[in-house]
Amino acid sequence: MRIGIPKEIKDHEYRVGATPAGVHALAAAGHEVWVESGAGAHIGFPDAAYEAAGARIAAGPAEIYGCPMVVKVKEPQPSEIALLRDDQLVFCYFHLAASKDLTQALVDRKIIAVAYETVTDEHGTLPLLTPMSEIAGRMSIHVGANCLHFANGGSGVLLGGVPGVAPGRVLVIGAGTVGTQAARMALGLGADVTIVDVNLPRLRYLDDVFGPRLKTRYSEAHAIAELAVEADLVVGSVYIPGKRAPKLITHDTVRAMKRGAVLVDVAIDQGGCFETSRPTTHTSPTYIHDGIVHYCVANMPSATA
């Protein structure tokens, strides 16, 4: 089969659908692999490395999207949708629950779409989404701490505090992969961290792992609102495979939060879990709504590709 690996064009997207090692495995299996010129150059995979692995280098996207199968990272952008062909097989992170227009475009073109974020293994886990969730979870605390700086519209709170000054309060909504990694990073900075979830066995597990440093609460509307109002940083990390994220922080709660607090919505690629969230980009990652800094970048892991 001819397999195309395009250069990603989403804002500041530096990831690539296959490394030279991956191309080598495909070529060794008898496939013809085309890689768009410059697809991996920014992260240390020059065209020459792909050629040495057995790939052919395409000058532009037209040749790539002429392949029966396309392997990429992020959902097709408008200019890429126009290049898709009927019955083409496309692998990427689609996050279709948040995009009716993209879903309809794929249906209209009879695309066979395999969404990485919904692929499960024999244990029922999400092996293709998990590494990206680990990155986004760890990043959420980095970016949240930066957003708290006065210069970025934040309240000026240092998450770890200093001797004589209390640490910042962090609320993590969701105790899955993203939430666990966010809690780990926040605890590492010395913050006062609370994590909420509806899965009590998961909360018990985290209590065993982190001990009394991590506070756990059962997730329900009253508890979330109470904790959010007290928080300096809230990380939304709820994920329901194939569905839009539930809105767990209401607009009324945002209005009641401390001015200069920060919301980091890691669930934004599934529609977001805060009522005041809207997608942002790495070029313009934040906005302020009712005095609260919102960070809602839909392709967070690309920053550390």
Image (cartoon, helix red, strand yellow):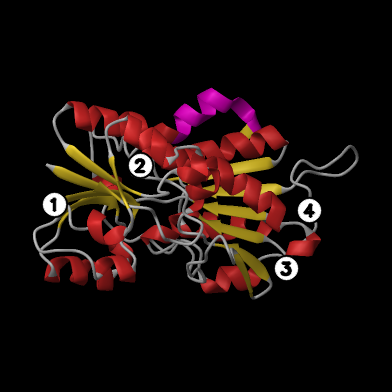
Q: Which of marks 3 and 1 is nearer the N terminus?
A: 1
Secondary element at image label 3: loop
Question: Label 3: which residue?
Answer: 259
Percent position (x, y) of residue 5? 29, 47
57 or 302: nearer the viewer: 57
Q: Which mark is residue 157?
A: 4
**What's drawn in magenta, residue-wise?**
203-213
> Is residue 211 covered in magenta?
yes
Question: Label 1: which residue?
Answer: 68
Badge 4 amino acid: Val
152 displayed left or right of 42: right
Marks 4 and 2, Cα distance to the nearest angstrom?
32 Å
Q: Which of marks 3 and 1 is in front?
A: 1
Q: Earlier in the sequence, mark 4 or mark 3?
A: 4
Secondary element at image label 2: loop
Q: Residues within 10 Å of mark 2 (few under 14, many from 20)?
A: some
Secondary element at image label 1: loop
